[in-house]
Image (tube, helix red, strand yellow):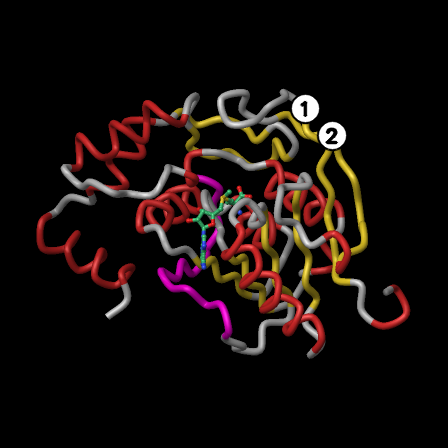
């Protein structure tokens, strides 16, 4: 049974949805700086929220609350999608490592036929549901690691996934396989340590306002990238 299904059943049985209630209580609803058409439940600061998540929920070893922020890579992708709706219109879209759901919400608003958002963090799954509802869009949140799978998506987005070496390598290799079989794959990334620059070319560049508690500067130059396949390499 998937976590999302298990969570939904638990909610029916108990009448409460702890992750969603926790998110509502510990975030503010704000417009995304580089995609103000979208509003998200976000936190001001990461470390305090992370401790609180563990304390209040009585669960230790939880991952950091990535879902509580609009990351630079996700903001760049969201802006690009909203400005180029033709890339998703009528398409089956996957937003991998969706966090808050930002990129998936942009794709849905831009007219995708269907949008799936994958996450390995159950709080992100709850945040995606809450943020999708807030923005009036329908997204299928999948609590699964889809790396290595190909379900025939037309378009695949990955926002800010190159911050950890092994994950970045696995993610990039998989995304390149999808791109080579013909999926339209875009990555949003501000040049994190493990970004595979030598395999990518820039599609668009933005200067993005980010949360100062997460980043080394307030404005991050952030690109939308695609794989350099064939003549580009
Ligand atoms: C830095 S956040 C980016 C979130 C969002 N894409 C954005 O740009 O705002 C990275 C996210 O990747 C998720 N993640 C890491 N490995 C994953 C995997 N194999 N499948 C799905 N999500 C994953 C984490 O839980 C985290 O929420």
Q: Residues within 10 Å of mark 2 (few under 14, many from 20)?
A: some
Whole-percent x, y for residue 65 in the image: 37, 37
Residue closest to the eye, 14 or 57: 57
Q: Is mark 2 within 8 Å of ligand 1?
A: no
Above or below, 81 relative to 149: above
Query: Where residue 220 sits: x, y (%)?
Result: 68, 29
The x and y percentages for residue 232 are 88, 64
Residue at the image point whose x is 68% and y is 63% from the top: 185
Q: Is residue 81 left or right of residue 169?
A: right
Query: Does dot 1 land on a helix, a strand or a loop?
Result: strand
State the residue position of label 1.
219
Q: Residue at x 42, y 32 (%)?
A: 41
Q: Which residue is mark 2?
A: 207
Residue at 58 percent of width and 78 percent of height:
152
- Find the distance from the CA under tag 2 to the CA under tag 1: 6 Å
Q: Is mark 1 within 8 Å of ligand 1?
A: no
Question: Which one is nearer the viewer's eye here, 67 or 28?
Answer: 67
Q: Which residues are magenta?
A: 134-148
Tag 2 and tag 1, C-beta contact below 8 Å: yes
């Amino acid at each position: 049974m998937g976590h999302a299904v298990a969570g939904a059943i638990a909610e029916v049985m108990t009448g409460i949805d702890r992750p969603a209630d926790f998110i509502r209580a510990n975030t503010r609803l704000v417009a995304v700086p580089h995609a103000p058409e979208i509003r998200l439940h976000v936190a001001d600061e990461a470390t305090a929220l992370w401790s609180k998540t563990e304390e209040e929920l009585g669960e230790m070893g939880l991952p950091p609350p990535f879902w509580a922020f609009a990351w630079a890579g996700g903001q760049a992708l969201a802006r690009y999608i909203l400005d180029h709706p033709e890339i998703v219109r009528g398409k089956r879209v996957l937003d991998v490592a969706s966090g808050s759901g930002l990129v998936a919400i942009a794709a849905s608003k831009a007219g995708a036929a269907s949008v799936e958002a994958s996450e390995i963090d159950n709080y992100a799954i709850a945040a995606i549901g809450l943020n999708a509802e807030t923005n009036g869009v329908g997204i299928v949140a999948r609590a699964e690691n889809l790396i290595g799978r190909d379900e025939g998506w037309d378009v695949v987005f990955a926002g800010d996934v190159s911050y950890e070496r092994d994950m970045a390598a696995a993610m990039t290799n998989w995304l390149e396989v999808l791109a080579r079989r013909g999926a339209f794959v875009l990555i949003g990334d501000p040049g994190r340590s493990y970004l595979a620059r030598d395999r990518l070319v820039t599609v668009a560049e933005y200067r993005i306002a980010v949360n100062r508690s997460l980043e080394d500067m307030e404005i991050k130059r952030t690109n939308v990238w695609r794989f350099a396949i064939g003549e580009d390499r």
